[in-house]
Image (cartoon, rainbow, N blue to C red):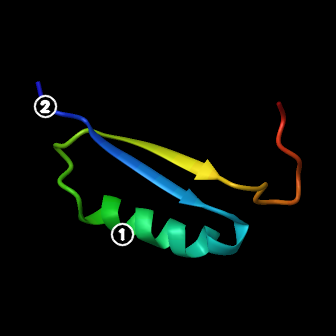
Amino acid sequence: MQEIIPIVVAFDNHYCIPAGVSLFSMLANAKRERERESKALLSNPLFGGEFKR
């Protein structure tokens, strides 16, 4: 059984595009045989909505 590679990215709506580029680049260049689990931590809503609690 292979180890799962955890990926955690934290950003706000001002850093959305660079974070997306970083994730895309990392996943595009990663070995496809490796399993990954990703989480995104947001400090405020991306598209003007409110967080639901």
14 to the left or right of 20: right
Q: Residue at position x 88%, y 59% from top?
A: 48
Toward the front, the furthest residue is 43
Q: Quadrant of the C terminus?
A: top right
Name the residue that disc number 2 marks: 2
Q: Residue at position x 67%, y 63% from top?
A: 12
In terms of image quadrants, where is residue 34?
top left
In terms of image quadrants, where is residue 30?
bottom left
Above or below, 41 relative to 4: below
The mark found on residue 33 in the picture is none
Q: Residue 2, percent across and down? A: 13, 31
Q: Residue 29, percent across and down? A: 24, 65
Disc on the earlier residue, 2 or 1? 2
Q: Are marks 2 and 1 in contact (CB under 8 Å)?
A: no
Q: Residue 7, percent across and down? A: 37, 48
Q: Is residue 38 or residue 10 the one in the foreground?
A: 10
Residue type at mark 1 is: Ser
Q: Quadrant of the N terminus?
A: top left
Above or below, 46 relative to 16: above
**Element class at badge 2:** loop
33 to the left or right of 49: left
Q: Is residue 10 or residue 24 the one in the foreground?
A: 10
Residue type at mark 2 is: Gln
The mark found on residue 25 in the picture is 1
Would you call the spot at circle 2 few (<14 residues within 10 Å), some (14-19), or many (20 or more)? few
